[in-house]
């Protein structure tokens, strides 16, 4: 299913996406070799071009009639003007299959289509269904045109099928790549929201950590904390890990590195809320506890931080006569 060019990513975007997905010349040649798509296939497709020009409009009309029978795909074409534009784009898209020269530019065009489909929320099943419909419709016409030479008809159809499967592979790879990229961005956003660096008072920061910590999250926490120390000119940071169920050796060592890095930036770190299990783990794996300033709970950690900063907290008692 095609999409209006006004919503398509730019060519530079498709080029960059192609590079990010490592779709270089060697990879494309490898895919063609796997599909056994060779020069005779290119020639057979070029021979089909005049025929394709003749059946293109009819096939597109029948394809979109099929789309409009289903609510899931019909919703994309509620505007008649959009429907007409998309039909024309789809016609060009399918005619490109028999134009030859399946080079980098061709790959970028297919990557662009996959990217657009992913961005508008078109499920892969509808994309695959559209190609299945196209192959059935065109296959019937090829065998009818070459009814006196069924062997040539079969070879021509197989050549078209090979190219279609390369297109499908490119589109699905684009779907997967962009979906994984979106998930990664969302995960990073969630991690940032779940681990805010809070300024309690001047020169004092608090970092409450909740949930499991893996190596990636530990690195992110360190980067986030160091930036906050610099921006807020912090002298003391209290990291509360009451909500952390377990800590493995890599995360523990990363925690020690965070303490060292913070010290180099002029800040003292206080760790609070160690559970019995986490404390036992740190001892078992041999973490150098001498480098870590630990306090039992968050309140105690804040009191220790204020002591380091030179604050004196006094309790105010109400006058009994009032």
Image (spheres, helix red, strand yellow):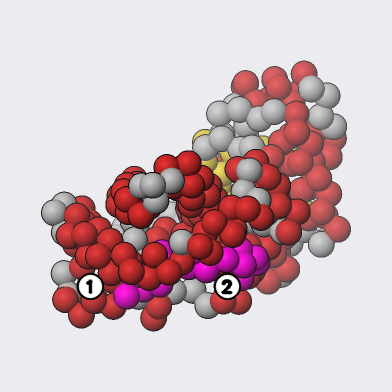
Residue at which label 1 appears:
83
Mark 1: give few (<14), some (14-19) or many (20+) Cα within 10 Å. some
Who is closer to the viewer here, 264 or 23?
23
Residue at which label 2 appears:
13
- Where does the image place residue 102, in percent across and percent down from the top left? 61, 63
Task: Report, in whole angstroms, how far the alpha carbon at label 1 lies from the one at label 2.
Answer: 25 Å
Who is closer to the viewer here, 317 or 21?
21
The quarter of the displayed image where residue 62 is located = bottom left
Our reading of the magenta stretch's main secondary structure is helix
Who is closer to the viewer here, 219 or 59?
59
- Where does the image place residue 159, in percent across and percent down from the top left? 52, 49
The quarter of the displayed image where residue 318 is located = bottom left
Who is closer to the viewer here, 233 or 120?
120
Foreground disc of the pair 1, 2:
1
Residue at 68 percent across and 63 percent down: it is 19
Residue at 61 percent across and 38 percent down: it is 213
**Residue 194 appears in view:** no
Outermost residue toward the front in this view: 148
Q: Which residues are magenta?
A: 88-105
């Amino acid at each position: 299913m095609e999409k209006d060019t006004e919503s398509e990513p730019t060519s530079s975007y498709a080029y960059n996406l192609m590079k990010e997905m490592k779709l270089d010349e060697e990879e494309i040649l490898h895919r063609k070799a796997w599909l056994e798509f060779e020069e005779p296939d290119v020639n057979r497709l070029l021979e089909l071009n005049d025929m394709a020009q003749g059946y293109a409009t009819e096939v597109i009309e029948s394809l979109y009639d099929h789309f409009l029978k289903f609510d899931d795909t019909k919703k994309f074409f509620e505007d008649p003007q959009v429907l007409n534009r998309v039909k024309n784009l789809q016609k060009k898209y399918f005619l490109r299959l028999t134009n030859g020269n399946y080079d980098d530019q061709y790959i970028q065009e297919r990557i662009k289509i996959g990217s657009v489909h992913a961005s508008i929320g078109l499920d892969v099943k509808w994309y695959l269904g559209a190609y299945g419909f196209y192959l059935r419709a065109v296959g019937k016409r090829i065998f009818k045109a070459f009814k006196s030479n069924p062997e040539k008809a079969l070879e021509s159809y197989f050549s078209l099928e090979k190219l279609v499967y390369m297109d499908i592979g490119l589109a699905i790879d684009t779907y997967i790549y962009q979906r994984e990229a979106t998930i990664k961005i969302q995960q990073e956003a969630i991690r940032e929201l779940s681990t805010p660096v809070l300024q309690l008072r001047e020169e004092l920061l608090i970092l409450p950590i909740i949930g499991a910590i893996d190596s990636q999250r530990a690195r992110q926490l360190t980067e986030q904390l160091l930036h906050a120390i610099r921006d807020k000119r912090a002298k003391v940071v209290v990291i509360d890990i009451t909500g952390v169920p377990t800590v493995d050796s890599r995360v523990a060592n990363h925690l020690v590195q965070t303490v060292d890095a913070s010290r180099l930036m002029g800040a003292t770190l206080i760790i609070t809320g160690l559970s019995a299990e986490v404390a036992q783990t740190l001892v078992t794996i041999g973490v150098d506890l001498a480098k870590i300033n630990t306090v039992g709970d968050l309140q105690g950690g804040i009191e220790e931080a204020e002591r380091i900063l030179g604050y004196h907290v006094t309790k105010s008692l109400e006058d009994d006569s009032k």
